[in-house]
Each structure stands twice: as structure tokens, then as C-alpha cells.
Amino acid sequence: MYQLRKLKLNGKAINSLNISIPLLMGIFLFFNPFPHTTTIKEICFYLSAFIVLLLLVFKKTAFSFKTPLSIPFTLFVLWSFFGLFFALDKPNSIHDFYAHLLKYLAFYYLLVNFFNTKKRLGVLIWIIILSAAAFSTWAITYFYFFLGNDIATQLGLGFTEIPINIIGIVTLFAIILSLYLFRQVTNVYRKTFLVICLIITSLATLLTQTRGTLLAMVFSLTILSLKNKKVLMVFTVSLLIAIAFLPVRHRLNMENIINKLRDDPRTGIAYNFIEVIKDYPITGIGFGMQTYADEKLLDKYNARVPTNYRQPIAYKAPHNLLIDVAVRLGLVGLVLYLYIIFAFIQMGWKKIKYGKDDFIRSWGRCLMAAFVAVFIQGMFENTHSGPPAIVLYAILAMMTILWRLNMKSDNQLDIKSAPG
């Protein structure tokens, strides 16, 4: 460390290093939904982290951990660390504690500190929209044209790195951002391009035919419609027309929904993991997700479930974000997780009600709608790792950026640098 400090960095080198971090994180975010891009993402993340450490050593960056979520995050991390001593699979829990918690928190703080202006936040929004549109284009082309699947087949069926429900989490987030950005963009070419991205991403979302995503869409659009009625009305009508001509309509008829509610395996899965919580109510089974792969353990609890809800095979995940936290970290961990959610909602509510300008208030509402969407989808799918976790932490970071912008004095707010 001392040897590093003896080196000298000139102004151009410092500027280049500071600019490279949002560039690398933008690449990381763009490739988030794409399968088989782990190497690219790892290089971008670790190179960004290294550059930040380098700048911190030379005291050439104003990196800050101060946010409304810092205390909830700290308490959650400390409890997760404490739980490592009681984990059923200690090596995997230690690995996942780093890979699926500390890394995501580092990602959160990188976004908060290096996309901390309105202009950069606008760039971040565009990256997410373009990423989802590019991924949707690739997924539709590859799945239906290259693989030759019938249009009635759910988009992504058989994908391993990004399953069907996960596709909906990525695309719906982009749809919400696109709808809110549309009313702010004035350039006709950007507006046209945004509509094209919205159509492609919406088509991919509907082709997944996931009810959880459609339910999340309904609630998020309801929140958005409070201040964006005209755009939302046009989009909703277009959506209903699209549904009428796509296979997803068959999954929305009343008989199909009733059958799904009656036979949904998630009910049995929930029973199974609630039995696990009963045996490990305080510290949980450990942070490691591979513990779910212990079939003997899960079969043991499956045998306790009422006969009508027993699963023919042991499902290796709760498919519910709240149950997932309670199983791995106990009820104490669940309370601390809910504290993070409470702190986020409180931060968002204050930005919506008392933001210093329309930019902060409107985007606060948009991000709250996005969070509601991810939370609802998290009731039906695992969202604490991979692309959905990146989406969740991106939403947390973007709301925090709004909080920081709101903390600045009025003459520091760059009103002209809104997205679009």
C-alpha cells in the first residue's frame, strides 16, 4: 500500500480512471441478462473494484458509504456473517456470503458513487433499456427461429442461466423505465427508437407467458398511471390487443387460473420449507444456496408436509424471496431483510412526496413501481442471485442516487440533464 502511494497520478490519468468505472459498470449491466457472458461481467466488475481501490489509496475519489440503506445493509451483513458459524454447509455459505451478498453490495455502492448525476443516471436508464431490448431480440430469434420452437412454447423454456420467470424480471424492469422515459424524451428519433425497444421487450415479456410477471405488470402500471395516464392508457390498450393474439391468453382464462391455484407446486414447496424454518428458526440453515441441493435434507421435511401437498421430487429452492431469506438466515434474518425493504420504501416515499424537483419526484415514483414489480415477481421465483439480483440492487442504487441528488442544494441540481 505504501509503495502504491509513492507513485504519482497526473490529472488526465485520474480523470481516465474515474470515467472508466461507469464505463465498465455500464458494460457489466448491459450483459447482465445474456447467458455465457460471465467472463466479461467478472472482468468489468473486478477491474472497476480495483480502480476504485487505487483511487482511494491516492485519495482521488469521493467514494462514500453514506446512504439510508447503509445501516440496514450493515445489520443484515453482520447477521449473515454470524450465521456462517451455524451453517449446515459452511464452505458453500462462506462462498455465497461473498458471491451473493458482498459482491452485490459492492455493485450497489459502485452505481451510487459513479452514476451520481442526473446525466449519468440517464445513461444508466438507457443502458438497462437497450440491454433488455437487445436480449429480447436475441432470445426471440434464437428460441423461435434458430431452435424452431412453436410460438405457443414459453420463451426461454430449457434455458439454464436465465429461466422463464427470470426473463420477465429483466424485461419488465426495462418496460417500466421505458414508459416513464417516453414522456421525458423530446427528440423524435430517440422517441421512435424507445418505442421500438418497448415493443420488442414487451413482446418477449408476453411470450414468457408467466402469470407472476403479468401480475407484477398490473400493479406496477397502476402505480405509474397515477402521473402518466395518457402513455399508460395507450400502452395498456396495445398490451391487451397483443395478449388477444398471443398464446399467453390461454393461460389467463378463468379455468386455467383456478386449476393453477389448486395444483400449483409452489404451495407444496412453501409447506416444505416452512418445515425447515421450524427446525432452524433463529439462524437458519446457512447462507449457502447449495444447501438446497441436499435431497436427503429436503426429503426429510417433505415427509412432514400434508399428503396432498407433498412433492414427488425435492424442489431445490423455495421460489419465494421471503421464505428463502427465512430458511437461510432464520426469522431474525427475515426481520433485518424487511428492515432493508422498509428503509427503501421510506426513502422512495419521501422522494415522491418531497423531492425538490419533478425529476426526483417522477423518477422516484417510477423506481417504486419497479421495486413493487420485482417484489411481486420474487414471490414466485428466486431473486437473490444472478440477473434478478442485479436488477434488485440496481433499483436500490438508483433510488439512492435520487436521494443524494435531493440532498444537494437547488443551484447544484442540473435540471437540463434529465434522461433523453
Image (tube, rainbow, N blue to C red):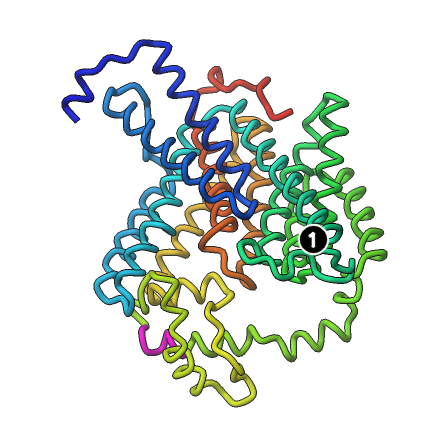
Nearer the observer, 308 or 204: 204
Residue drawn at (28%, 13%), measured in percent from left and top? 9
On the rendered image, what quadrant is the C terminus found in?
Answer: top right
In the image, farthest residue toward the bottom: 307
Residue 366 is situated, as x and y percent measured from the top left of the image, at: 60, 40
Q: Position of residue 188 (x, y in %)?
A: 77, 23
**What is the magenta range?**
275-280
Q: Residue at x 79, y 44 (%)?
A: 233
Q: Name the residue under label 1.
A: 143
Direction from residue 294 to residue 36 in the image, left or right: right
Q: What residue type is labelled 1?
A: Phe
Query: Residue 258 at x, y = what percent?
Result: 71, 76
Image-based side of 383 in relation to 18, left or right = right
Is residue 342 found inside the magenta-colored segment of the image? no
Q: Is residue 311 above or below residue 157?
A: below
The residue positioned 67% from the left and 44% from the top of the image is 138
Image quadrant in which you'd find residue 179: top right
